[in-house]
Image (cartoon, grey):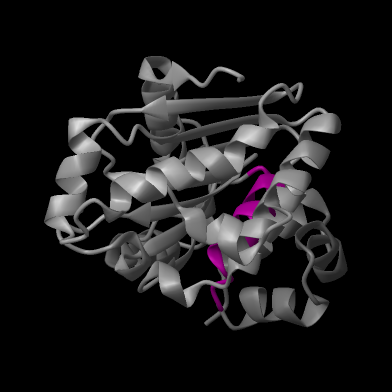
Amino acid sequence: MQNERLRVVMASEGWTHADLANATGVDPKSVERWVNLGRTPRRQTALKAAEALGEDVHALWPALRQARAARAVSPELVALYDQRADLPVSTFVDLFAQARERIDVLVYAAVFLQEAYPRLNDLLRERANEGCAVRIAIGDAGSVNVQQRGQEEKFGHGIESRCRLALMHYRPLLGTPGVELRTHETTLYNSLYRADGQMLVNAHVWGVNAYGAPVWHLRRNSDGGIFDGYAQSFDAVWGTATPVQEG
């Protein structure tokens, strides 16, 4: 069935199939299918087309509203992983390597990064030297919340020792312009790994070590979205954290 509204709008604006294809980055045959067969493009492509034509996307493709309501999936969600162990360390490293403005890390320990990628500090220095602000918040080994987490995960004093190990790993960064290191005592609901407008969120599950808990990859899409919510939580924890002193 023909998408009559799309055809009329394109005709009124003098747009050809090739024009709309160029504006949306698709093949002209795809545009032809939208118009003549009533096909619905992917949401991001539809948004580009609607913006180019100055139209409401749901007026052009009402099915998108229904599809989004049915899926209830945030446009900021890039990927969802069953557990952190499914992600190679290169995923985290590549994320940080792409950062140009900001790197934020909020964890209790996450020593797996340093253990699997010994050049992590070098990478963070390189990013800082290029003007990237680096903030790292790790758990205070002496805090009640860290100790409680160890009991819940049946990890005992292991998590406290790993917090101390993480601090030892990151200490060489102290004094590097653009890099800040702090310890926090908060209840950690999620470990956060942010690089500019992308973030890996390692959800914490009661009694489960972080490596066995899910991870979602977010890309910032708009103000006030899921990404911003986690970014604000990082800032809130950072404001209560204690700067690590040199020496």
The quarter in which the C terminus is drawn is top right
| Foreground of the two, 227 or 30 | 227
Number of marks in picture: 0
| Rendering quarter of residue 8 | bottom right
Residue drawn at x 79%, y 65% as measured from the top left? 25
Quarter of image, res 22? bottom right
Query: Measuring 37% from the left and 66% from the top, which residue is drawn there?
Result: 211
From the top left corner, tell me how far across and down residue 1 is, in percent. 52, 82
- Residue found at the far front of this picture: 247
Q: Percent position (x, y) of residue 48?
A: 67, 53
Residue found 60% across the figure and 66% down from its top:
116
Left or right: where does residue 85 sit relative to residue 2? left
Residue 221 visible (yes or no): no
Q: Nearer the viewer, residue 165 or 91?
A: 165
Residue 190 image offset from top left, x and y in percent: 33, 47
Residue drawn at the location 84% of the way across and 31% of the way down: 129
Q: Is residue 43 magenta?
A: yes
Which of the pair 109/70 is nearer the observer?
Answer: 109
Q: State whether residue 67 is above or below residue 222.
A: below
Q: Is residue 116 visible?
A: yes
* Image side of residue 155 versus residue 220, left or right: left
The x, y position of residue 13, in whole percent, is: 78, 50
* Majority secondary structure of magenta residues: helix
Res 128 quadrant in image: top right
Q: Nearer the viewer, residue 151 or 59?
A: 151
In the visual, does 39 lie left or right of 25? left
For residue 145, above or below residue 156: above
In the rendered image, residue 22 lying in the magenta stretch gets the answer no
The stretch of residues the image draws in magenta is 39-54
